[in-house]
């Protein structure tokens, strides 16, 4: 057996010669361990940074800014699980290493849906809803949806309402909140009054010492004048700027005293715009010129969307400056003058007028609510008591869904003999305000707040207005849980009619 074995061994040695280790040769490198790249995204394919990825029992890693994490491939199937704040966890089973050595895993976001309502159950549009670092705006029905969120406090804010919040556990699919309206008790400062240090100081003192908690400051008045050095170029181009006050100083004074800040913008009556842009103004078919009221004031054509741009630009600027509420006055069709000769781009029947006004106000709210400002409209008091739009384009039922605040101008002196059964309505201020509100409130079927303008001036039949006359109007608004705004052209108010400030 030994003689036979030797040749066999020699043959084997000869065959295996090339694999013999020779001193001085390098050791061949071990084969590289393959790696698997995982990309974590949302359903739209956007990368998710800082997601935690678990590679079976091997290791864990966080994704980088491109949503990527890498691990060694174990030469067998691999279970991958991923989680990230604001997303539902996800997993995937990789049975074999793909040729690209890349797999993708999409995580579904955590979605919270909800609704914000008024105290009486109306869905409330234009509410800013915040959770964590995300803020959304409720839609027309008061609904909202927030994505990629974690447990926390849901906060709802809207100018003219008290804030509300609700704890969310991160699991419940829906949440509901309700907002209570603030009762705003206001006076009004004309542009010159806001710019007169002494007069402005008196108005601030009135708000500090009485129940007044808001001031309406004129941005633009009935003549078309703009009372500060606006950044809206159009106002300068048409010569409308008559700088009386610094809005930054005015707003700082109001903020310091926790006074709700409203600004009034006269909308479509504007002699400066009518002269500069007759193509966007109401036209007079009789004179073939810009139509004017009996008092010589031009009106911009509310059916022409180009006429909206200027007042909306002033409104956006006012909101940026820090006002809480933008109040549009003269947001209507003209009624004083030769209206039978007035020519408009759009229809001048009731449907056309109402559509034009409500469309303008809806556009204003779509711009201003997301910025945090409420939108108010001043309306003739007659539309609270009479059917139809009275030629104004103002209809209570439409306005209730177009604005946040409706302010009917319920001035007893403006009612003619016979209204509400009174020979002299002006001599019956409390009952007139009561009747007007009771006529209109049931027709406000949307979420709008009603806050009437009431009379603090003497005009027409009856006795001069004083403490009793002004207070009787206030009491009727308060009896219906409403706020109010006092009108006096010179911004001089009957202090004795006001309750003292709450302790």
Image (spheres, rainbow, N blue to C red):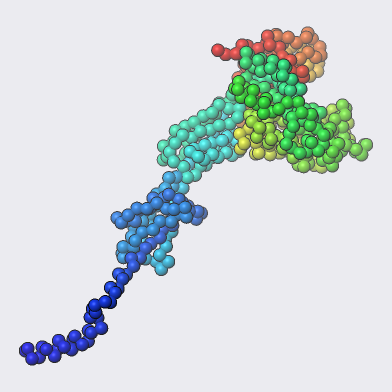
Residue 11 lies, in percent from the top left, at: 18, 89
- Determine the residue positioned at 68% across, 17% down: 201
Q: Quadrant of residue 75?
A: bottom left
- Of all residues shown, which one is farthest toward the front? 24
Query: Could you tell me how many numbered marks the image carries?
Result: 0
The residue that appears at 61% across and 37% down in the rendered structure is 370
- Look at the image and tell me in which quarter the N terminus lies: bottom left
Q: Is residue 143 left or right of residue 341?
A: left
**Identity of the residue furthest to the right in this view:** 287
Q: Is residue 25 above or below residue 69?
A: below
Quadrant housing residue 218:
top right
Q: Is residue 215 above or below residue 273?
A: above
> In the rendering, at what x and y percent does residue 481 appear?
60, 19
Q: Nearer the viewer, residue 300 or 223?
A: 223
Viewed as shown, does residue 313 lie left or right of 341?
A: left
Q: Where is residue 148 drawn, in percent x and y? A: 47, 45
Give the percent coordinates (x, y) of residue 165: 49, 31
Q: Nearer the viewer, residue 102 or 440?
A: 102
User: What residue is shown at x 47% (from left), y 52% (from top)?
Assistant: 65
């Amino acid at each position: 057996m030994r003689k036979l074995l030797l040749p066999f061994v020699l043959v084997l040695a000869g065959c295996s010669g090339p694999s013999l280790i020779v001193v001085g040769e390098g050791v061949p490198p071990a084969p590289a361990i393959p790696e698997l790249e995982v990309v974590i995204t949302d359903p739209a394919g956007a990368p998710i940074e800082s997601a935690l990825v678990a590679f079976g029992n091997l290791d864990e890693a966080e994704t980088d800014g491109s949503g990527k994490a890498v691990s060694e491939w174990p030469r067998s199937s691999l279970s991958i699980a991923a989680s990230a704040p604001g997303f539902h966890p996800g997993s995937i089973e990789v049975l074999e290493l793909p040729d690209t050595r890349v797999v993708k895993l999409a995580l579904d976001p955590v979605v919270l849906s909800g609704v914000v309502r008024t105290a009486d159950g109306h869905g409330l549009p234009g509410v800013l809803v915040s959770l964590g670092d995300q803020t959304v705006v409720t839609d027309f029905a008061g609904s909202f949806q927030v994505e990629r969120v974690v447990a926390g406090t849901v906060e709802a804010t809207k100018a003219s309402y008290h804030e509300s919040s609700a704890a969310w556990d991160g699991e419940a699919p829906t949440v509901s909140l309700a907002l209570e309206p603030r009762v705003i008790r206001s006076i009004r400062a004309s542009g010159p009054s806001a710019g007169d240090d002494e007069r402005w100081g008196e108005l601030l003192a009135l708000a500090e010492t009485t129940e007044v908690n808001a001031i309406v400051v004129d941005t633009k008045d009935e003549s078309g004048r703009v009372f500060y050095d606006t950044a809206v170029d159009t106002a300068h181009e048409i010569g409308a700027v008559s700088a009386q006050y610094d809005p930054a100083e005015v707003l700082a004074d109001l903020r310091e005293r926790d006074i709700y800040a409203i600004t009034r913008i006269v909308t479509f009556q504007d002699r400066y715009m009518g002269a500069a842009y007759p193509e966007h103004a109401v036209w007079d078919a009789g004179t073939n010129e810009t139509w004017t009221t009996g008092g010589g004031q031009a009106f911009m054509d509310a059916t022409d969307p180009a006429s909206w741009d200027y007042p909306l630009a002033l409104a956006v600027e006012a909101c940026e400056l820090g006002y809480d509420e933008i109040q549009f006055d003269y947001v209507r069709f003209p009624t004083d003058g030769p209206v039978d000769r007035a020519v408009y781009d759009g229809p001048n029947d009731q449907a056309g007028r109402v559509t034009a006004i409500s469309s303008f106000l809806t556009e204003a709210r779509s711009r201003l609510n997301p910025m945090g400002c409420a939108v108010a409209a001043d309306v003739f008091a007659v539309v609270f008591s009479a059917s139809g739009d009275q030629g104004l384009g103002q209809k209570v039922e439409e306005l209730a869904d177009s604005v946040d605040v409706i302010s009917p101008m319920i001035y007893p002196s403006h009612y003619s003999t016979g209204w509400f059964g009174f020979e002299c309505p002006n001599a019956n201020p409390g009952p007139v305000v009561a009747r007007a509100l009771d006529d209109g409130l049931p027709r406000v079927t949307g979420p709008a707040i009603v806050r009437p303008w009431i009379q603090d001036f003497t005009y027409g039949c009856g006795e001069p207005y004083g403490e009793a006359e002004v207070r009787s109007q206030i009491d009727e608004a308060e009896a219906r849980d409403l706020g109010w705004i006092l009108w006096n052209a010179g911004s001089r108010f009957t202090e004795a009619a006001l309750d003292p400030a709450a302790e």
